[in-house]
Amino acid sequence: MTFMRQTAKTPTDFESRVYEAAAKIPHGSVTTYGAIASAIGSGSARAVGQALRKNPFAPEVPCHRVVRSDGSLGGFFGKTSGAILTRKRSLLEGEGVCFDTAGRVEERFLKRKP
DNA sequence: ACCGTGACGGCGA
DNA sequence: TTCGCCGCCACGG
């Protein structure tokens, strides 16, 4: 992958798969940590989150299109709350993604089971 | 090699 | 429906 340039440290095998899976998410749609986990054959959505947590390839890897299973935002740039999340939401809205009154992405934009 | 940490998720209360 | 507890598993100290 072109975005796999050398920066800080060499991604592990697992991390590379996470980034590649995330890179496939089409503009205007959203997926979940769990969906990526099963897509790359891991039973842990949490482990996926950990890989994205220090995503060295932003914005080539659109990690803002990865949210929680319940539709809530999850984290962004290492934070799980705060203004940075507003940023994440803005990016998604800019791609046409809509949110409900509870601040969760509407079901129709989620690609859970590929 | 062991242990704590975490951008998660399912389930019971 | 929301909240808390616990299982998950890769990473770094």
Image (cartoon, coloured by chain):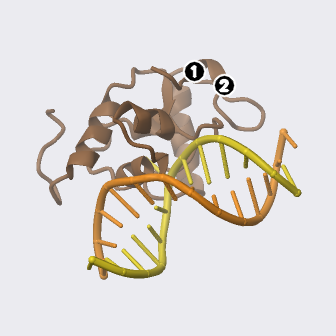
Chain colours: A brown, B yellow, C orange
Q: Number of callouts in the render?
A: 2
Give residue A93's quadrant in the image.
Answer: top right
Q: Position of residue A107 (x, y in %)?
A: 65, 23
Answer few, some or many: residues within 10 Å of disc 2's Cα (few below 14, many 20 plus, some between 14 and 19). Answer: some
**SS state under label 2:** loop
Give residue C4's quadrant in the image.
Answer: bottom right
The residue that mark 2 highlights is A106
Q: Do labels 2 and 1 touch, CB within 8 Å? A: yes
**Image point (56%, 48%), residue name:** A85
Q: CA distance from mark 2 to mark 1?
A: 6 Å
Quarter of the figure that contains the N terminus of chain A: top left
Q: Amino acid at mark 2?
A: Glu
Q: Amino acid at mark 1?
A: Phe
In the displayed structure, does residue A39 sit left or right of residue A8? right
Whether residue A70 can be seen here: yes
In the displayed structure, does residue A78 sit left or right of residue A82? left
Residue A112 higher or lower than C7, as above or below: above
What is the chain letter for disc 2? A
**Image point (60%, 57%), residue name:** A82
The residue that mark 1 highlights is A109
Q: Position of residue B2 (x, y in %)?
A: 36, 80
Whether residue A60 can be seen here: no
Q: Position of residue A19 (x, y in %)?
A: 29, 39
Asked if labels 2 and 1 share a chain, the reply is yes
Answer few, some or many: residues within 10 Å of disc 1's Cα (few below 14, many 20 plus, some between 14 and 19). Answer: some
**SS state under label 1:** helix
**Image point (34%, 35%), residue name:** A40
Q: Position of residue A42 (x, y in %)?
A: 39, 42
